[in-house]
Image (spheres, helix red, strand yellow):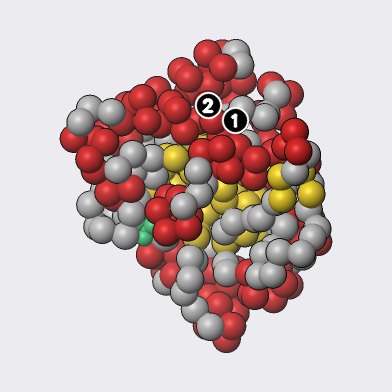
Amino acid sequence: MRTPIIAGNWKMFKTLPEAQALAREIVAGTHKGEVEIVLIPPYPFLSSVADLISGSGIELGAQDLHVIAGDNEKLEHFGARTGMVSAPMLKSVGCRYVLVGHSERRQYFGETDHQVGLKVRAALDCGLEPILCLGESLEEREAQQTLSRVATQLQKGLRLVPQNEMTRVVVAYEPVWAIGTGKVATPAMAQEVHAHIRKEIAALYCAMTAQTVRIQYGGSVTPDNAPELLAETDVDGALVGGASLKPESFSGIVAFNER
Ligand code: 13P
């Protein structure tokens, strides 16, 4: 039995007072039951949001992490890297989760599958649980490359993760063409890719591991479309962008899972 995980990725939105108000309203208005809820604010607001959600059962996540890879991929978590934030820093301000390989990181910051694999390793090394994001572009979908693209991202993202650590990894399937566009994957499309990801995890590890890993769907999730997406067998929650910025819509997505 996989506990659904609903995460709100606030991306580069909100000022500190707005972020605090949003966190307060989510704590007050969201019924927490059999669902895990994660708030993922921008870096400068992490400590403050950590305080506001303390004791509520809601978890904290970060949007990215930095790691320095030396010879033989020896990982360093501290160093002269102006502007960057590493896994132990995130852990020390109360993060449990961290997004790795979000498509916006890949698209705008040139993050490669190789770097994503190192970041997943860095997160696990420092006691964080990575949410490994993957998904195809519109061109890849139209060229029937969705399943192969997602499988490659998965294999490379998990290349440094042994089986015994897979219980600490969450996968998020986010088709790039559905992010922030209002174009949501149909439940059948999402289920097809989620089932494929689970099959690939079974091939990389074993069937039991594949059954325990949670796979979130992300891309224009709203309270209206969440029920049918989340009803699919292999959809174990949602990674929500735009709709997580309004307390009532985020709580509405969580509420469906409570029924
Ligand atoms: P939207 O819900 O705004 O489409 O964003 C999805 C996303 O990228 C979450 O990480």
Given the current orientation, which residue lies at the most extreme bottom position?
17
Give the vertical position of 110 relative to 193 (above or below): below
The percent position of residue 23, horizontal first and vertical second, equals 58, 72
Q: Is residue 81 left or right of residue 133?
A: right
Task: Name the spot of residue 93 as percent of width and height, x first.
Answer: 77, 65
Task: Judge whether residue 215 can be spotted in this image.
Answer: yes
Q: Amino acid at mark 1?
A: Leu
Above or below, 149 relative to 65? above
State the residue in front, 21 or 128. 128
CB under 8 Å between discs 2 and 1? yes
Density class for disc 1 (Cα within 10 Å; few <14, some 14-19, many ≥20) is many
Task: Identify the residue under disc 1.
Answer: 158
Quadrant occupied by the N terminus: top right
Residue 155 bears which disc, if any? 2
Mark carried by residue 110: none
Which residue is rendered at x = 75% and y = 33% of the image? 72
Residue drawn 64% across the image and 74% down it: 45
